[in-house]
Image (cartoon, rainbow, N blue to C red):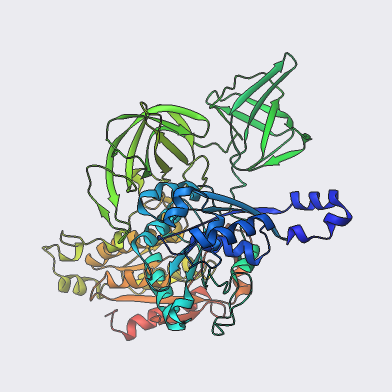
Amino acid sequence: MAHQSELIKNDINAYLEQHEKKELMRFLTCGSVDDGKSTLIGRLFYDAKLMFEDQLAAIEKESVTQGTTGGNFDPALFTDGLTEEREQGITIDVAYRYFSTNKRKFIIADTPGHEQYTRNMATGASTADLAIILIDARHGVLTQTKRHSFIASLLGIKHILVAVNKMDLVDYSEDRYEEIQQNYRDFASRLEIPDLHFIPISALLGDNIVDPSENMPWYNGSTLMNFLENVYIGSDRNMGDFRFPVQYVNRPNLDFRGFCGTIASGIIRKGDEIVALPSGKKSKVKAIVTQDGELDEAFNPQSVTLTLEDEIDVSRGDMIVRPGNVPKAAQDFDAAIVWMGEEPLVAGKEYYFKHTTKVVSGTINKLRYQIDVNTLSRQDAAKLALNEIGRCSVSLSTPIFFDGYKRNRDTGSFIIIDRISNVTVAAGMILQRTSSEEKVDYWDEVDTEKSASEVSSEVTSEEREKRFSQKPVTILLTGKPGAGKTSIARALERRLFTEGYSSIVLDGPMLRRGISKDLDFTMDGRSENLRRATEIAKIINQSGQICILSIVAPSEEVRKKAASSFGDGPFVVAHLDAPESQLEKRNANRKVHEIAYEAPESPTIKIDTGVHSPPECANELFDYLKNEEILL
């Protein structure tokens, strides 16, 4: 541990320098009441020998009169400092503790589990890199467990550690641990948690806290302390978008004018070009000033003073960014709101909104829906009460500069303040999309109208087959970038035309330039691109044509959705494959978006495009259509 370092005795300056350079991680403990959050932190400090002797002596003494362990050592007293907390044996306010090991510095937020103190939990979670969610092994996943998990996900915490506590009270049962783990995974599958881990522990007895437990030989994973020291958080911060909200204009004399604040995201270097918002005036960074002297560069979350080469108008509440990489500017947007006020949210009432260093007045125009934390379903609601969460439409008196919360936690968040009492009544997370842009998974929507294939026509399908001498079919050419989808689609189209058949090609790049121009290249964007393409393909099939659909379609699940959307209609999945070396060579001179491609489990036909030329592959597909009597 840091306080045991030999450098303290031999070279205190070297020790302090080493300590200063350690990575800082903030984490919180949360979960339902009495799940053992405070006990966990106390045991962590005790087993890691991070308690001072006077602290330990005081806890041992108070354990006799105020503890909840029958007079034995009660680690929970280490963080429960309020008189009311010790009397009731609960956590009420957020308690912060600080410690360091040889690898990292830590700030812990011990948050309350009671529902009425959920707002305190949200406060602790707002700056956390990681959340430890405790679950009592006797009770399993409770409503407050789900609420805290949802808030942690909503607040953008990427790393979640589920500590299944009090394993000693269920005889260290592996089956019980696995049951709780599965129940939590079923719930968490609907949340955005990129990094999820589980550890079985006994906070009171120290099992798997610092040292591996001898009582759970079936568990071979990491201990809690080892996990905290090694979980990777280096890529969590946004270092690409430079955002510097100006907190204070420092003008001590006629020769110095600097802009003070904390870098919300990104990196700034001496000599970099900047633009001040909202004025739009440009300049360059003359110096980056700190109490310890000037720096060549600074980054999030450093607090610095920037001086500029030009005298431009910049005030508190303005934002300094880079030209060509500016945040959105708007006064109307949608946000997820965690309501913390005793009085319910009132749509149309005027509040103060504090966003970064800027305070403006505004209203919540509309509560679009409330989120049920148990089912994560959306419910119509007229108001938000204490601790409830919903999506709201916000309208401010003046524009602010922001990024979506998922992209930038600092510029994407705000608090709402009551104008009369000056009490903070809500925390908000600005959504990346407006309500009109909100992503919807249309695959799952039930269409109450008749589908295209059900609309009556004066021309029967039999008449179309006789005219074109073919049965309508959609052929999905799927494969990694460079597999030859476009070339083979065009070659098949030519062969069919030469033989007297009628077909239409829907090519991925062509769709991206037109009907799917608004979509990105994420898995969600690709899913919606395939859905739109299949809807067009069904219309083409209805007219009696063969549709050749050339598209990456990387997800097996989405491909199955596409196939099922055709009902009994013919749908052919042709998997085009080639060795990685050939794919890399083909993609060498073009931009390729990274994607995790899942090969079809049972494609209709698989073609090796590394061996055969596009015309040969097209002939193979043509022969298949002939053999299946699709071509008459």
The answer to which quarter of the image holds residue 419 is top left
Q: Is residue 523 above or below residue 168?
A: above
Decide which of 349, 631 is in the foreground and name it.
Answer: 349
Q: Residue furthest right?
A: 10
In the displayed structure image, the side of residue 266 where residue 598 appears, left or right:
left
Q: State whether residue 37 is above or below residue 263.
A: below
At a point 44% along the width and 57% down the height, the residue shown is: 89
Res. 92 in view: no
559 over 512 or under it: above or below: below
Please provide percent x and percent y for residue 611: 56, 80
Q: Place residue 313 in its image quadrant.
A: top right
**Front in this rendered view, residue 60 or 40:** 60
Q: In which quarter of the image is the C terminus?
A: bottom left
Taking the image as shown, residue 283 lies to the left or right of residue 85, namely right
* Res. 217 visible in picture: yes
Number of numbered discs visible in the structure rendering: 0
The N terminus: image quadrant: bottom right
Residue name at image x 35 percent, y 75 percent: 499
Percent from the top left, x then y, of residue 165?
Answer: 48, 70
The x and y percentages for residue 427 are 41, 41
**Residue 582 image-quadrant placement:** bottom right
Image coords of residue 514 (percent x, y): 39, 50
What residue is at 21 percent from the left and 62 percent from the top? 446
161 with respect to 15 (left or right): left
Front residue of 540/32: it is 32
